[in-house]
Image (cartoon, rainbow, N blue to C red):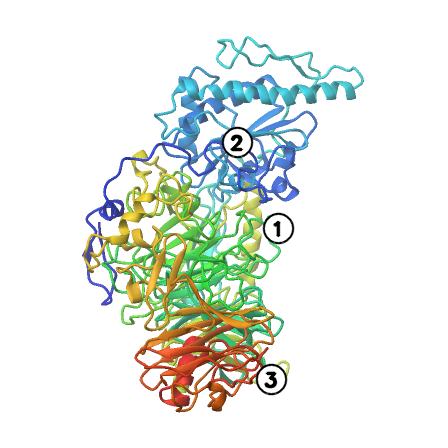
Amino acid sequence: TTLRRPGSKFTRFTVTMRLSDALFLALPILPPAPAAAQTAIGCDASCPPLGYESDSSHLCPGMTVDDVAAARLHSICHPLNTGFANNELSFESFREKGRVTVVANYYTGCEAGRRESGVYAGIAQRIHDETGGRVTFVTSLKGGSDCSRWAGVYHEDAVKMGLTRPSTMPLTVSDASYDLRDRFFTPPYPHPSYVVLDENLEVTYKSVGPCCGYASYYDCTNEVALGLDQMLTDEIMLIYNKQSSSLEETAGGEEVAMVVTDPTKTSNGEGNGGIATVVNSTDQPFNDSGSGNQNSVACQSTEYDDWSACSKTCGNGGIQFRYRIHSEGTVETRPCPSEVASSLPPCEEQCVPEFGNDYSTTVVASGFDSPRDLAFHPTPGVHLGPYSEGRTFHPDQGEELWVANGLNHSVSIVASLGTKHQTTISRRDRGYYHYMNNITALAFNSVRNSGRNPDQDSFNYFAVCNDNLNDYAGSKNPNLFMGPTLYDTDTVNKKGRKNTVNRIGEDCSDPADECFFLHADMLHEAPACIGITHDPEVETAYGTVYWAFDTTGDNSGGAGQLVRFDFSQPHGPGSMDHSIAVVRRYPEVKLYEDESNEHGHAGMIVHPTKRILYVANPGEGTVVAVHTDTGRYSRTARDEYPIFSNRLPSFEYSIYECVEQQEDFATGLDSPSGLALSLDGTRLFVAERGGRIVALEAETGVVLQSIDLSQFGYTSILGLAISPETGDLYFVDMDTNKVLKINAARITEGECTYQSLISAEFQTAFDTAQLRVDLECGKNLFSLARDYSCKVDGSIPNGTLFEQVHTNTGYASDNPDVQSMAGMDEAAALLANRTDCEYASELNLDALLLGGYYCHICLPQNHGSSCDAGGTCANVQWQGFTCDNEYYVDFDFNVNDPSLMISSLHHDRTYPKDGVLELSRGVTYRFTVRTGSGRPVSIVTPPNISPKASLMESPMKSRSSHGGAVSGPILLRVDDATPPCLHMTLAGTRPVTLMIKGADECPGSSVEPGDDMNGVPGVGAPEGEGSGAKCISFIRGYFALVFVCFVFTI
């Protein structure tokens, strides 16, 4: 497949093999793994699954479907005309005396469980008929398939296996949001799987089908699959007969529907158990109709109504529409006629409160490294807490702004924004060269009170988008295995979860440790991504839906595409299981980057009530408006886009077509970049890269007001963000490395106002037409943005496309938990000695990183580690790495001889208290102090004295203006100006000698306990203040010190 990154950044290249083939070259070819479980759970039907006992999201026997899940409406895609209102069901309608409901969980494709779907369909029709409709069967069709085609397949399978021909059962639900799976069969519960609910919607039975564990559809035979008949029939009739007996007793002996089990009959009449028929029934068969669909005949009018008024009151007048009461071709639109538009006034700029009648800018923070985007954290303090990395924070003071730095692949956190406690700290992933490579956009899940299960809700998560083709920071030929990365920011309420880790991979719970993000998930279908936003929907169980701007989406090289990523159930820290996710491509939404700028950003934001996604389209100078809940499955994307995250059918990778969009919602813009919505959702702000920010009316796309910031020197504006507390507008300027706020001039009420430019007459006509079509034809049929001629011919994917991308490498095996010690692929150990690190060598660096290597000679920039300057790393496979220039400083509470204890993970030793620690010039050393409150540690140097002189005999030369570090790092840069002898001191203990390599001898550590030692300038703030790394430099004095601190802090 030929793929090209448009513009001058990347030249054309050709991928001539599947990514899996490329990765095979990283390791010797191994025998195929046995066909076993889809997950480490295997086919164990335990509920909750083993290892997930504390997870409350699993619906298990004895539990009742919660009210939210029971009330949710599900669209029935087969059969049609069921009699349910709008062909939608809710499980609440099955909460009825004597009722039994059965739910099945399948995936499309040629996986083994699909063999059971025909058996289930035959059982469903027979039992439903024989119980007078009191047993209802539901099956969920996932989003990666066409409903009518798949229903036809399992209906045909039922007949071929000699079962009852399905007609009205099962009810196939279009589970495009995976709501049924994630609420009834929360992963990692195996599949195919089944739940039986009683009349109160209580789970009476939950288990796994007989085809579980077979590798494919062809491995599970009909004979095996037919075992489902006996399994389900027994459990269904057990609860059905029990409820029927209870009904008879309640009725006081009156005749009720009774079912008698005939142990000699099965679904195909061949004996060995089954169910008999309804006898002595005085009930009418259950009517599934609900209110019924009364409009199918009426919705056939061929006559259109008159054209509406024009939509806008100025300029070109917008559009007109006309409609008819018909299920096809319901609405037609056209531009406002020129004779009408010519009579309208021009659209004059007005005044919006975010700009005011006059404005100014304030630099909020500076010193970033090519900032591309910014976003407000929904819960300030939940990530940093009151203390982190030796620094004090004030989570109850001010907002928290997160900034994406493109060039150093990090996120800067501006804490306590706008208060006297404001401070900035930088943080990144240990594997930033893959997970945060040229980070260009970030977005938070800010949806509070979503009603989701707390163990599933991804509130406070954020995702980043990387403008890179996966070249490992320029060190490797790119392979396009790149996409958005997901992180959970909550460390305060989720201690021990490893949402942040130290270098060695332990939970970053010690306030002295340097912390790194540890990703919760990553998907790999959008390389060179320049925009991302969270979807505030509340339909999915986890809330992990993000929309992304993929600049490489069009394989012809002509344009990018819109891609919807649903991480579904994030695999969580420490795992690499990508089997539970949904990726959908929208090729009709063509997006273009600005090829004239090397580093770009495209703003994206979803209107929370209109359900419209606004996308900046820099190369076209437009803003595109996409209706997020539209589009239909067309085909699998695995054929046209062969680089994807997982082979299993539970990973959906699809192409959606017939999406509703307005390609020219806003036009005439100069390289639009950042987007933001006003707090009330009525104004859309668009940044033009060159310095202008435009306020558009969100309803019409008309310019309400604009401001020009280029006059202040800001000519590289990218991301925008609105403060959720004040409504103030913030932006990043890439070239000046600043975050700024727009200050609207103080105005009296009434001086800054604007009038909506939507025509009241048009709005009335729209509301009337939509209501009438909804009533007479059903919902979701009326739309001004729909192409009613668009048809989708859903195709069934080729089963060979469901092959693991990375089989037999360090990335993945048939066990998806390969990043844990238990699931470690032993073959990954063979990568340790690979030295073919050349740009175009066969070694794939994904196999290194995802095979448990955070330090390797072939990984970029200091072997992939984040050791401080001059340090050398050592890999600890599947966990992290150590650095030879990092030491821990603890306090020994020995009553008779209290002392400092120096230890090193890298050297695996604790140094004797009277020993000497040798340091080398050209290296920055990190001493992580963990002595605790009241025990400040300093590094000092004596004056020029003879090596034999006692430290007690000469006063120490003070190099500290503060009290030292008690919890956090001291960074000591040893260079040519560093004295040959230093001492680490703590009042009341013997000093520890630090001797620079090459020195003949240092003064003895003979200072007695109780002597007062002063420290080195810049070691740190007074105890309790916390100022991050304590930076020490003996070159260029104060200015070098400030430089070191600045780089570390920002």
Q: Is residue 670 left or right of residue 230?
A: left
Residue 535 appears at what percent x and percent y? 49, 56
Disc 2: CA contacts within 10 A as few (<14), some (14-19) or many (>=20): some
Q: Amino acid at mark 1?
A: Gly
Q: Is residue 678 left or right of residue 816?
A: right
Comes first in the chain, label 1 or label 2: 2
The foreground one among 307 and 835 is 835
Viewer can see residue 604 = no
Disc 1: CA contacts within 10 A as few (<14), some (14-19) or many (>=20): few
Q: Is residue 863 above or below residue 37?
A: below
Q: Is residue 394 left or right of residue 141?
A: right
Of helix, strand and loop, which one carries label 1?
A: loop
Residue 316 appears at what percent x and percent y? 42, 68
Of the two numbered discs 3 and 1 in the rendering, the one whose residue sits closer to the viewer: 1
The foreground one among 648 and 251 is 648
- Quarter of the image for residue 712 reads bottom left
User: How far apart in space, not on screen, are marks 1 and 2 (Cα)?
Assistant: 28 Å
Of the two numbered discs 1 and 2 in the rendering, the one whose residue sits closer to the viewer: 2
In the rendered structure, find residue 747 and report the number of the disc placed on it: 3
Comes first in the chain, label 2 or label 3: 2
Q: Amino acid at mark 2?
A: Ala
List the residue tagged with mark 2. Answer: 45
